[in-house]
Image (cartoon, rainbow, N blue to C red):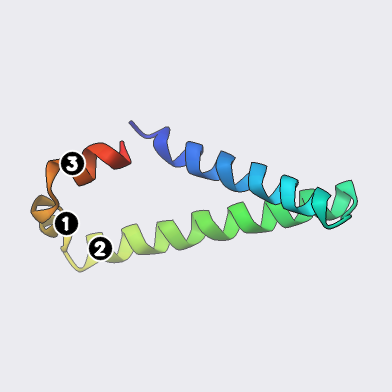
Amino acid sequence: MQDVGLIFLSAMASSIDTRGTAHGLNFDEIVATTLVSTSLATVITGVFVFTVGRLKLGTLVQYLTMPVVGGYL
């Protein structure tokens, strides 16, 4: 279940590669952009999860309908 986030990061990396190649960026620029983008996405997600936990807002997840949770997973 924890590997779901890796699917999104992989999709981001693939998209950055595709668009970078289309715009004529070299390999080093594409790798740097990918590393920075995936790192920032991971940090932002971590801060969000920490904040939700710190504010004890985890109980709000129970208000999500099962199709929403199932669609994410």
Q: Which of the 4 quarters of the picture holds residue 3?
A: top left
Q: Earlier in the sequence, mark 2 or mark 1?
A: 2
> Which dot, 3 or 1, sits closer to the camera?
3
- Provide the residue designation for mark 2: 52
Q: Nearer the viewer, residue 51 or 8?
A: 8
- Mark 2 and mark 1 in contact? Answer it, CB < 8 Å: yes
Q: Position of residue 18 (x, y in %)?
A: 73, 46
Amino acid type for the residue under numbered disc 1: Gly
Mark 2 burial class by Cα count in 10 Å: few <14, some 14-19, many 20+: some
Q: Earlier in the sequence, mark 3 or mark 1?
A: 1
Amino acid type for the residue under numbered disc 2: Val
Q: Image check: 54 left or right of 37?
A: left
Q: Nearer the viewer, residue 40 or 53?
A: 40
Q: Image check: 32 left or right of 38?
A: right
Q: CA distance from mark 2 to mark 1?
A: 6 Å
Q: Image check: 18 left or right of 45?
A: right
> Which dot, 3 or 2, sits closer to the camera?
3
- Provide the residue designation for mark 1: 58
Q: CA distance from mark 3 to mark 2?
A: 22 Å
- Provide the residue designation for mark 3: 67
What's the residue at 18%, 41% (across, down)?
A: 67
Amino acid type for the residue under numbered disc 3: Pro
Count of numbered marks:
3
Q: Image check: 8 left or right of 30?
A: left
What's the residue at 46%, 63% (across, down)?
A: 44
Q: Position of residue 24 (x, y in %)?
A: 89, 55
Above or below 23: residue 72: above
Secondary element type, mark 1: helix
What's the residue at 42%, 57% (across, down)?
A: 45
